[in-house]
Amino acid sequence: MKIEQMTIEEIQKGYQEKRFTVTEIVQGYLDRINKLDSQIGAFITLCKESALKEAEAIDKKLANGEDIGMLGGIPVAIKDNICTRGIKTTCASKILEDFIPPYDATVVRRLEDAGAIIIGKTNMDEFAMGSSTENSAFQKTKNPWHLDKVPGGSSGGSAAALAAGFAPLTIGSDTGGSIRQPAAFCGAVGLKPTYGLVSRYGLVAFASSLDQVGPFTRTVKDCAISLQIIQGHDPLDTTSIQREPEKDYISDLHRGVKGLRIGIPKECFKEGLDPEIRSAIEKAVRQLEEDGAVVEEFSLPIMDSGLSAYYIISSAEASANLARYDGVRYGFRAESFTGIEELMENTRTEGFGKEVKRRIMLGTYVLSSGYYDAYYKKAMMLRQKIQKVMKQAFEAYDIILTPTSPVLPFSIGEKTADPMEMYLADIYTVNINIAGVPAISIPCGFSKEKLPIGLQLIGDHYTEKKLLQAAYSLEQGLGVYHETAFLKEAE
């Protein structure tokens, strides 16, 4: 089997059977990145020397019969808004282009403690603001399945790296769909955990009450393995889970969906949904019914009304969170200024991109005197309503099923002139972040153009185990495994 098609499970089995070394695997991925990433643009920073050094150390442990950890020798690519000690963390922004954190994010520390090897930092929309990875200050990332299409965003670099076979596990962040939408566009499994289940310590904040870190993998089982490592309480994160986390997501994956109540919101199948996506979802629903799930259509009217609340709340929080980038303490500083006010103004004008400025302006506006009650307060009231309606839905259903995106991967540059059209690509994903519940996107087919189609399963708080079981059952039934994209065009 080719290196780019291997899962976490298969690599670990190869180590145990001594079919290859950790150094060979890491070098194989680095060679592939060097050969192909110039056409994809998935990475901002590659960690070649440190990755090979770590691989050698794990090979020695293997030779001595020592335990190498649950992710021992597995190369991982990290989204570039997650802090990595000694490795540049830019948020794909000019304002942080030379920032090197003095500490690791908790997620990074947990991955390394489990034996994972950080292979590089992936491209993204600047400060995670975007749905296409076209807003990076450094490069545009392309969809490995079709090089003139976007990979989704904001975690498009992580999704593209997984799809192109540059790493068997990548990490992203999800504020309004930024893991699930690129997972759907790139044919990967992408999980947005319950808010608080995975520590946000070391994740550079976009909207603190919405952001959550999660994995991209080839298979649902790899996703379960990854979540088991990165989840759990963190005393460094005040929003972290206080309850005892799930100890094992893997052993019950085969349980299936028999008797599971699955609800399908009518509102997700109105005008605007691509017919090829509708067809793929309908096939998946039939598969669930064949496997014994009880599937019902129901009304969930908030599905198409949460977008406005999301953009008001997220922009307001971004306005506050990004105030720290002022050219005084760290990061980019404008060269020309005469006083402190001009320093801040010039630094932020030169350092931030168009989309970031747009959201800072919107966020500052809705928080300003005279507009706070009219916009921000109403958005927070709608947030409470969305949370209540979702909670009621989960009293009737174990899982809610929707498309991940209403559209197939669109062409690079197609939606950049109309921000509202771009924002609508997140219509099925934003409510999940507002409610703080978990959701997983899995591949469920391909369009006629060989573009991936994603399906979203949503659960109540802390029901990741049930979500993973349902996703695994669907994955097995549909036979839609993550293939490696881009091979024919590139090799």
Image (cartoon, helix red, strand yellow):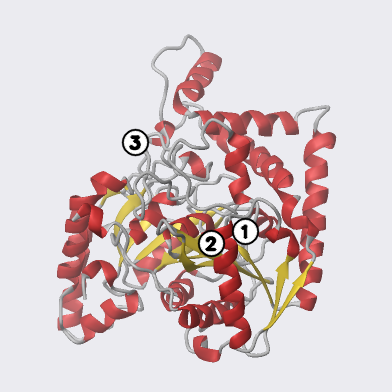
Relative height, residue 329 to residue 113 (above, below): above
Quarter occupied by the N terminus: bottom left
The local secondary structure at tag 3 comes to: loop
Q: Position of residue 115 (x, y in %)?
A: 31, 72
> What is the quadrant of residue 316 in the picture?
top right
Q: Quadrant of residue 482?
A: bottom left
Q: Label 2's element?
A: loop
Q: How many marks?
A: 3
Q: Residues within 10 Å of mark 1 (few under 14, many from 20)?
A: few
Amino acid identity at mark 3: Asp
At which x and y percent is residue 352? Answer: 48, 29
- Residue 70 image position (x, y, % from top left): 36, 78
Residue at 52% across / 45% down in the picture? Answer: 131
Amino acid type at circle 1 is Thr
Q: Residues within 10 Å of mark 2 (few under 14, many from 20)?
A: many
Marks 1 and 3, the one that precedes in the sequence: 3
* Viewer-side residue, 216 vs 269: 269
Question: Image point 80% across, 34% down: which residue?
Answer: 372
- Image depth: mark 1 or mark 3 in front: 3
Q: Which residue is mark 3?
A: 98
Counting residues from the start of the chain, the first of labels 1 and 2 encountered is 2
Q: Amino acid at mark 2?
A: Ser
Residue 199: mark in rendering:
2
Q: Indicate whether 368 appears above or below 205.
A: above
- Say which residue label 1 marks: 238
Task: Give the mark nearer the N terminus: 2 vs 3.
Answer: 3
Question: Foreground: 487 or 91?
Answer: 487
Q: Quadrant for residue 378, please give it.
A: top right
State the CA–CA distance, disc 1 to disc 2.
9 Å
